Image (cartoon, helix red, strand yellow):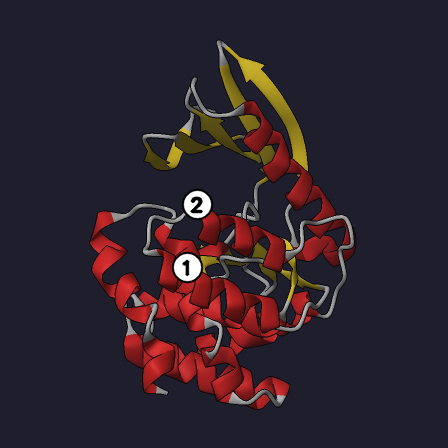
Amino acid sequence: MAKEILSENPSRVIYREKDAVCKEFAKDFPKEEVFHEAFINARAEAVCGPLVPKVLSVECEKGKWILRREYAEGETLEALMKKHPEKKEEYLQQLVELQTALQAHRAPLLEQLKDKMARQLNELQIDESTRYELLTRLAAMPRHEKLCHGDLRPANVIVDPEGGFHVIDWVHGTKGNASADAARTYLILALEDREGAECYLDLFCQKTGTKKSYVQDWLPLVAAAQLTKKRPEEEAELRSWLQICDHM
């Protein structure tokens, strides 16, 4: 079976090869990041079972690292939402149900979310007063141990023909605060669909009994973390979120 390209960017190409999905990294991609992603995926699959497609191998071919995982048959939740926009709230409810199911698990060997965010804030090019305010806010947040995907969006959820769910792309997985994870999902959705993001947040808070303001307290922090990805098309909006706490 020939390679079926699923997606690509300058740092990696993702393609299907028989019953595996392969992520082939560019030659200059850091080796430690490849193995770190494989480790996170392996820890998640160990505690979540079939919800997480298994890592099959990590290999180096012609100077490029390749991470192989199980292929999950089906469509992404994102594709289904585009096909059936009238079911958007239903699909967002499914996203919330899945996210809370993941967060019910513990993965003690993963990095602590607050530690990762502190590192990102210290790397970010912002004025020192803003950095201090963000780090102070982060330090005051509760330090939880729940499994957090870190990038849970409809594009990272595959729905198989039997209606089962499979969560992919665990590169940002950590242990930490469920509301921080929800704030991250809200922000991802809001960058493209503010109405959908608000619907998601309402559903998450109803499901978990969490005050909306508590999730919103994380928004400046997750926006700052997202800025470290250096995506020009997002920068203006993300920087506006850094001060959102002043208007709540």
In the rendered image, residue 138, in percent from the top left (x then y), is placed at 54, 66
Which residue is at the front of the view, 63 or 83?
63
Q: Residue furthest top?
A: 62
Q: Looking at the rendering, in which quadrant would you find the C terminus?
A: bottom left
Q: Residues within 10 Å of mark 1 (few under 14, many from 20)?
A: some
What residue is drawn where x is 54% and y is 86%? 205
Type of amino acid under label 1: Arg
Q: Is residue 236 above or below residue 53?
A: below
* Helix, strand or loop for disc 2: helix
Direction from residue 232 to residue 130 in the image, left or right: right
The residue identified by callout 2 is 123
Q: Nearer the viewer, mark 2 or mark 1?
A: 1
Type of amino acid under label 2: Glu
Pointer 2 or 1: first along the chain: 2
The residue identified by callout 1 is 131
Direction from residue 64 to residue 124 in the image, left or right: left
Which residue is at the front of the view, 25 or 28?
28
In the rendered image, residue 126, in percent from the top left (x then y), is placed at 33, 54
**Distance between the alpha carbons at the discs numbered 2 and 1:** 10 Å
In the rendered image, residue 104, in percent from the top left (x then y), is placed at 72, 70
